[in-house]
Image (tube, grey):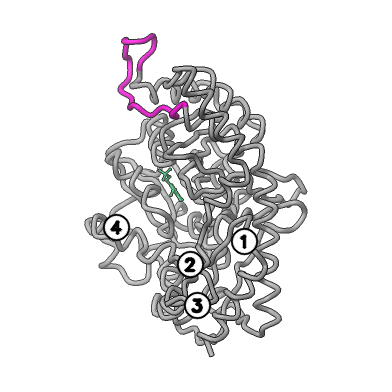
């Protein structure tokens, strides 16, 4: 129940964003409706060019959703039955779904608990054949045709290490950057790289709740290799080139023209919105620290971990920024804490009208549709991911969130944990 003097605090307030740029959005939508150009055309080409400039890539190709972006990237690599693709078990379903949809086998490898992202050291162990537990699944390292690091919550997976693995084992990288547009990471040589830019493919989502969200579904693929870029362009139009002639079988996955017009308007504001999210995250960190609510990270992060978490911390573990140094940037698609009694805290927050969400309550290797992969029969394959699925809780974050509301979120968490 909401307190009488306390209005609800949503997890995300898209209305506030709309109100702040309504005139620009409405004018773009009206212009599009009057033009009668509803499929592809100039607005899509213009947006592709604008976002390629923003990301600093040669080829940015619009498509119907982030899920399709992943599917098209794997299709361009000719991935299919008999192949395997490594990814994180702690992600939205689409990442694993795209692999399975093509008849390939997803190989779920554990996360690095500090940043919730696929752990490059564990991936390397699998590829070297030194993690004997995986042998029981019947997938061999030689079958691996791609690796999909997921940049969860707006923070990049360790791309420096993944690029080295990709080169050493000659396996393409498909970055799932659905949650991380504009995120950056600094490498040890000091260069700063963006999410979805350095891998062979970058896959982005414009689902409305994303930092750059459309008024419906939308997605984007970035591709380094010009031939693969051309293949993706053809695949998204049923494999047709020239029109009505098909050398390959594709799908219908165009970026909707109205969405492209909307996204073009919003792209101009993205960096300001991301900076505001970073500032809100910093303020949450300060409030939690000043309230004495911060717990040390569980010791098992640096050592062994079991899915039955032994962690006895009484407070919250703050999001751990692995990329904040030297120009790197977490873009805080989510501000996600860890807490021991997560479900009761989540319920307590909901009871007083404070938005919150669990991304994600069940790991992909534990999903019913993947039972046949055989993970249940092998103990402790992805224990860090299972712990994260029991402890992660995302709190309200959006550019327009007020400091008073943030104070109320932290005070309420303090009361609920007491
Ligand atoms: C990590 C991740 N991958 C893929 C997707 C799929 O994107 P879409 O919803 O646009 O299909 C999402 C979106 O929710 C996501 O968060």
SS for tag 4? helix
Is disc 2 surrounded by few (<14), some (14 to 19) or many (20+) residues within 10 Å?
Answer: many
Q: Comparing marks 3 and 1, which lies closer to the viewer? A: 3
In the rendered image, residue 307 lying in the magenta stretch gets the answer: no
Give the image location of residue 334, x and y in percent: 55, 59
Which circle marks residue 355 in the picture?
A: 2
Question: On the picture, is 262 further left or further right than 241?
Answer: right
Q: Secondary structure at mark 1?
A: loop
Question: What residue is shown with label 1?
Answer: 401
Q: Quadrant of the C terminus?
A: bottom right
Quadrant occupied by the N terminus: bottom left
Q: Are marks 1 and 4 in contact (CB under 8 Å)?
A: no
Category of crowding for the residue at label 3, using alpha-carbon neighbours closer than 10 angstroms: few (below 14), some (14–19), many (at least 20) = few
Query: What's the CA distance linking mark 3 and mark 1?
Result: 20 Å
Secondary structure at badge 2 equals loop
Q: Under tag 3, what secondary structure?
A: loop
CB atoms at circles 4 and 3 under 8 Å apart? no
Which residues, given as a range, are shown in magenta?
A: 240-257
Question: Alpha carbon of mark 2 to alpha carbon of mark 1: how far?
Answer: 12 Å
| Quarter holding residue 283 | bottom right
Q: Dominant secondary structure of the magenta stretch?
A: loop
Q: Nearer the viewer, residue 32 or 62?
A: 32
The residue tagged 3 is 4
Give the mark, 3 or 2, whose residue is nearer the N terminus: 3
Mark 1–mark 4 Cα distance, whole angstroms, equals: 46 Å
Q: CA distance from mark 4 to mark 3?
A: 55 Å
Query: Where does label 4 land, which residue?
Result: 137
Looking at the image, is 87 positioned above or below residue 212? below
Q: Is mark 2 within 8 Å of ligand 1?
A: no
Q: Could you say which disc has been placed on residue 69 in the image?
A: none
**Nearer the viewer's eye, disc 4 or disc 2?**
2
């Amino acid at each position: 129940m909401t307190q009488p003097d306390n209005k609800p605090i949503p997890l995300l307030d898209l209305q506030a964003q709309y109100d702040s740029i309504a005139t620009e959005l409405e004018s773009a939508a009206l212009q599009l409706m009057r033009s009668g150009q509803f499929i592809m055309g100039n607005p899509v080409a213009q947006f592709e060019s604008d976002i390629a400039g923003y990301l600093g890539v040669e080829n940015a190709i619009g498509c119907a959703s982030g899920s399709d972006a992943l599917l098209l990237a794997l299709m361009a690599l000719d991935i299919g039955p008999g192949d395997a693709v490594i990814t994180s078990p702690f992600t939205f379903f689409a990442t694993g779904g795209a692999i399975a949809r093509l008849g390939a086998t997803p190989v779920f490898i554990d996360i690095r608990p500090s940043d919730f992202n696929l752990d490059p050291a564990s991936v390397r162990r699998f590829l070297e054949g030194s993690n004997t537990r995986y042998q029981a699944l019947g997938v061999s390292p030689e079958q691996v045709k791609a690796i999909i690091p997921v940049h969860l919550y707006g923070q990049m997976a360790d791309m420096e290490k993944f690029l080295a693995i990709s080169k050493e084992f000659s396996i393409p990288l498909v970055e799932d950057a659905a949650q991380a547009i504009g995120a950056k990471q600094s490498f040890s040589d000091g260069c700063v790289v963006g999410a979805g830019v350095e891998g062979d493919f970058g896959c982005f989502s414009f689902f409305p709740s994303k930092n750059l969200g459309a008024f419906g579904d939308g997605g984007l693929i970035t591709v380094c290799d010009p031939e693969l870029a051309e293949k993706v362009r053809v695949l998204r139009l049923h494999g047709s080139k020239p029109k009505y002639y098909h050398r390959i079988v594709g799908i219908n996955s165009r970026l909707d023209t109205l969405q492209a017009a909307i996204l073009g308007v919003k792209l101009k504001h993205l960096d300001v919105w991301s900076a505001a999210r970073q500032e809100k995250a910093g303020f949450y960190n300060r409030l939690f620290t000043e309230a004495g609510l911060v717990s040390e990270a569980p010791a098992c992060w640096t050592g062994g971990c079991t899915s039955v978490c032994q962690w006895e911390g009484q407070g919250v573990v703050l999001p751990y920024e692995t990329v904040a140094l030297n120009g790197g940037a977490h873009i805080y698609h989510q501000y996600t804490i860890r807490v021991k009694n997560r479900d009761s805290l989540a319920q307590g927050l909901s009871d007083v009208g404070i938005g919150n969400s669990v991304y994600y309550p069940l790991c992909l290797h534990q999903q019913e549709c993947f039972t046949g992969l055989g993970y249940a029969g092998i103990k402790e394959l992805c224990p860090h991911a299972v712990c994260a699925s029991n402890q992660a809780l995302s709190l309200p974050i959006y550019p327009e969130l007020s400091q008073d509301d943030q104070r109320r979120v932290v005070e309420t968490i303090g009361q609920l944990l007491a």
